[in-house]
Amino acid sequence: MEHWLVALAHALPQLGNVVRVILVEGPRFHRPSRFLERHPLNVPTAVVRGSLGLREERVSGLLAVFRESPRAVVIPVGVADAADAVGVGKRMGLDLRLVTCLHGIGPIAIAEIVRCARDTDIAVSVSRHGANALLAEADLPPSCVRHIPFGVEDPATATPPRQGEGPLRAAYVGRLDQPEKRVRDLIAIVALMKVHPFVLDIVGDGPERSVLEQALRDEVAAGRVRFHGYLAAKPLRSDIYARIDALIVLSPAEGGPNAAWEAMAQGVIPVTSDFLGRSEEPIWRPESNCLVFPVGDVAQAAAQLTRLRDGELRLRLSAAASELPPMYRRESFARAWQEVVVEVDQVPSRYARLPARIPTSPGRLAGVPRLRSALRRVQRLAGLLPAPLDAGGEWPGAYPDRDPRGVPSLRRSAHSGLDPPFGR
């Protein structure tokens, strides 16, 4: 999501748009300065603080920033209060448009987009499966739903198709989570590949990293497994994608696995689970540009990797993988989003005919917001307020009351096991 935000913020000004990135700040998890260190931006930024842990404080702060622009298209990225602020602003008469984007396909992510549908002008999904889910579950006309993959940059230099010489090199790139990404399957896959010349690069970080490092410590010592931690985009392209043969995807469910598309652009062959949403995405062509195994079937995953020892097969799949359809490239990504911004700016704003009331956090002082804010401020200064347990506790990424697929009681701020971490 961070890379998506930065890419969009850099692309839209080149097409004539005035862009500002609003970063949110919290007492513990949300640090705009740290974000900007890792993701430098060449557009103006603003910071909205949420030190009291009150929903009305967060919404009011965002609304104050929106009021600074006479006309604006707002695109929330993992900040649920932004959609609420746009809805309130619309009902106050501000000239705002709301464009939401679905980055995952877990129930909470979809439920949050559904929750905001009444004030949404256009809803975008990075995956075809997500777009189909919104068409089925959100109260939005089909003309307001788009599928725009996160386009990848073309390699700086042409990468030749993979040959059959040397050990098979594979990589896992992404969050080290369980069960969302099923990264513990890597342990069994490495064991099954022990009889073959095989090297695995693990790129990324997360709660399962220590588990993997402990389980694979002998393989690390032997040089068959290497942990790289987080890598920025350029070294990821030059040091990993340019040198590996295969990228392993293990997830049970995915929206747009951008790491796979980035790797394919450099001729890397995806060896992927048959995750929910794969068959709906036109990029995947099993036995033509990728190899597929059932979710959780580590024996089949290892068998598919072993097939890539065949130099002729490796060469054919690599050449096909590098031929990404235009819609998955950065130029098409920028152009498609420019079309959304232009279109949404030319049509009447959609919003529910409700009172322009800022939503409040639950509490016995809900009817006296100023008193409650003053009390919270005193408690915060005195160190009496409990610290949020996660980023979603500071700035929630979702407020779904009900999963549109029928699962009740999904009201929570922390992320689930099927969604990307909220509250970026």
Image: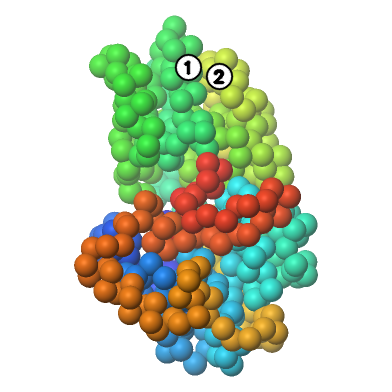
Residue 253 in the image: state x and y as whole percent: 61, 39
Residue denoted by label 2: 298
Residue denoted by label 1: 188
Residue 365 in the image: state x and y as whole percent: 45, 75
- Pointers 1 and 2 in contact (C-beta within 8 Å): yes
Q: Residue at x 66, y 39 (%)?
A: 276
Front residue of this view, candidates 28 and 361: 361
Q: Is residue 159 left or right of residue 221?
A: right
Element at badge 2?
A: helix
Pointer 1 or 2: first along the chain: 1
* Dot 2 amino acid type: Val
Q: Residue at x 44, y 32 (%)?
A: 172
Q: Is residue 76 left or right of residue 229?
A: right
Q: Residue furthest left?
A: 382
Q: Residue furthest top?
A: 195
Picture disc at residue 259? none
